[in-house]
Amino acid sequence: MSENELPLTEERWQAIVSNDTAYNDQFIYAIKTTGIFCKPSCKSRIPNRENVRVYANAKQAQQSGFRPCKRCKPTGARLPDQEWVAVAAQFIGNHYKEPLPLQTIADACHGSPYHLQRTFKRIMGISPSSYVQQLRISKAKQLLNETDQSVAGIAAAVGMPNTAYFITLFKKTTGRTPAEYRLHRSRNEIG
């Protein structure tokens, strides 16, 4: 626990879990895995208790390296869109192997799915789901280049357990099936 941190008592934890507005002026909580801090009344997804850090105020949370939540706006100011989208992209990068519906990403980044979709597309030029697909295909190319893992194994490793869908998406994105991509790479190494 850092010098600015307060203990996470059962009372504070229950205030977070129940989104109790009565505690908004008593403390701020931060989530270690997302780097975001919130008011106790924030309606975002309930974090894992072991990832929660408690501070007396927003200033202390910011001094400890956390950013304000876009949903509950604990500082009264808005998180700049580019920084918020960067948080979403980082979350996607850390969780691309898991199912990632828009709601899950929005909850993790403390915003609404509609606002995330619109803002992400404006900043990144593609939707969050397209970004997830691009990242998965990029990771699949890396695995095809660096391992002898089966196509089905690679599909599962990048979060796409439906091998047929993975092959179709890979070909649509790269112009080759995963097997053709690997074979082309092998020919280039020989030639």
Image (cartoon, rainbow, N blue to C red):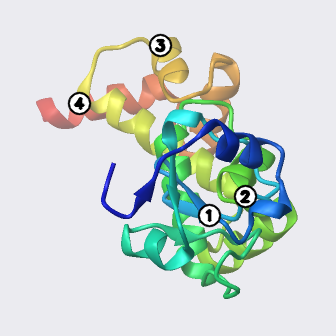
Q: SS of the residue at dot 2?
A: loop
Residue type, label 4 = Arg
Whichever of labels 4 and 2 marks the residue nearer the N terminus, that label is: 2
Residue that label 4 marks: 187
CA distance separating discs 1 and 3:
46 Å
Q: Is residue 116 left or right of residue 6?
A: right
Compared to residue 87, the image places residue 150 above or below, namely: above
Q: Determine which of the numbered discs, if any, sits on residue 27 in the image.
A: 1
* Residue found at x 71% / y 72%: 25
Q: Determine which of the numbered discs, if any, sits on residue 153 in the image.
A: 3
Q: Are marks 2 and 1 in contact (CB under 8 Å)?
A: yes
Q: Quadrant of residue 127?
A: bottom right
Q: Are marks 2 and 3 in contact (CB under 8 Å)?
A: no
Tag nearer the camera, 2 or 3: 2
Tag nearer the camera, 2 or 1: 1
* Residue 179: image location, x then y, percent: 45, 22
Q: Are marks 1 and 3 in contact (CB under 8 Å)?
A: no
